[in-house]
Structures are given as structure tokens and as C-alpha cells.
């Protein structure tokens, strides 16, 4: 299953050169797969993503906005996207300011569908 996830991340980054890092993380903050620069600590990114997910889910519930789907953070040097990928995973992507937001969101959504499908296929095999 790990190779499947690595391939999904690689395709996402190749299709979007302004996307510089991506990771698939469990809702508990454990790394599942990543395509990160060597200077980025996978464990730290995973923990931060889980924290962002938890806070986002809480805010959505408290504001009665349904279920969490995605979080988009705009920084002075780029964007961070956190997107639900089924029940078992979250996709996080870091981009430069030159990213075409609509395109990366669409590609992230497609990647999340593939990630969720991969988990479902593995559960069916068990």
C-alpha cells in the first residue's frame, strides 16, 4: 500500500510544480507517506497537520457547518492545504505563491479520492 501512496504524491507534485511538499497522514498524526524536502521533519509536519485537523473539525462542528473537508492557509511565502482523504487519512500540501489555487485544489481532491479508495480496497481484502 505504501508504494500506491508514494505514487499518488509523486503524480500530484509532478502535475503541480509549485507544490513543493506533500504528505499523507493519519488523523492521529502518524505519517503514512510523504514527499518532503530533506529539511522538513516528517514527524513534526504530521503532528502539526493532526492539530490543524482537530481544530478545524471542532470549529466546523461548533459553527454547525457540517463535516470538515479542507483547510487552506495563505502565508506570505505560500499556501498550506489540508484535505480529508476518507476516514483514515489526511492529505497536506505545501505550495509557493505562484500556485494556481483552483487547479491544486482539484488535483488534491482527486488525490484524496484515490487515497480513500486505496484504504477501502485494503479493508475489503482483510
Image (spheres, rainbow, N blue to C red):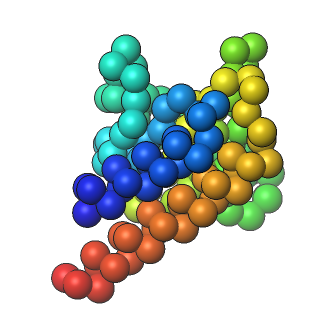
Provide residue 84's location: percent of width, then percent of height.
56, 56
Q: Quadrant of the N terminus?
A: bottom left
Query: Against 47, is 5 above or below?
Result: below
For the point 29% across and 85% down, which residue is it?
124
Provide residue 29's location: percent of width, then percent of height.
38, 41
For the point 36% across and 70% down, which residue is it?
119
Nearer to the camera, 5 or 68: 5
User: Residue 98: in sight, yes or no?
Assistant: yes
Number of numbered tags placed on the structure image:
0
Q: Is residue 20 left or right of residue 69?
A: left
Query: Against 13, is 94 above or below?
Result: above
Query: Against 10, is 73 above or below?
Result: above
For the point 71% across and 38% down, which residue is it?
72
For the point 49% across and 32% down, which residue is it?
21
Nearer to the camera, 11 or 33: 11
- Most extreme residue toward the left is 126
Q: Is residue 81 left or right of residue 74?
A: left
Nearer to the camera, 50 or 14: 14
Q: Quadrant of the C terminus?
A: bottom left
Provide residue 117's location: percent of width, then percent of height.
44, 74
Amino acid at each position: 500500500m505504501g508504494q500506491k501512496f508514494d505514487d499518488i504524491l509523486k503524480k500530484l507534485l509532478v502535475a503541480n510544480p509549485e507544490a513543493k511538499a506533500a504528505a499523507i497522514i493519519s488523523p492521529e498524526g502518524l505519517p503514512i507517506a510523504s514527499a518532503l524536502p530533506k529539511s522538513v521533519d516528517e514527524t513534526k509536519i504530521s503532528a502539526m497537520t493532526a492539530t490543524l485537523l482537530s481544530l478545524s473539525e471542532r470549529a466546523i462542528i461548533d459553527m454547525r457547518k457540517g463535516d470538515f473537508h479542507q483547510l487552506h492557509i495563505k502565508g506570505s511565502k505560500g499556501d498550506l492545504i489540508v484535505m480529508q482523504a476518507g476516514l483514515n487519512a489526511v492529505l497536506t500540501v505545501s505550495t509557493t505563491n505562484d500556485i494556481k489555487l483552483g487547479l491544486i485544489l482539484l488535483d488534491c481532491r482527486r488525490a484524496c479520492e484515490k487515497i480513500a479508495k486505496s484504504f477501502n480496497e485494503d479493508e475489503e481484502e482483510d
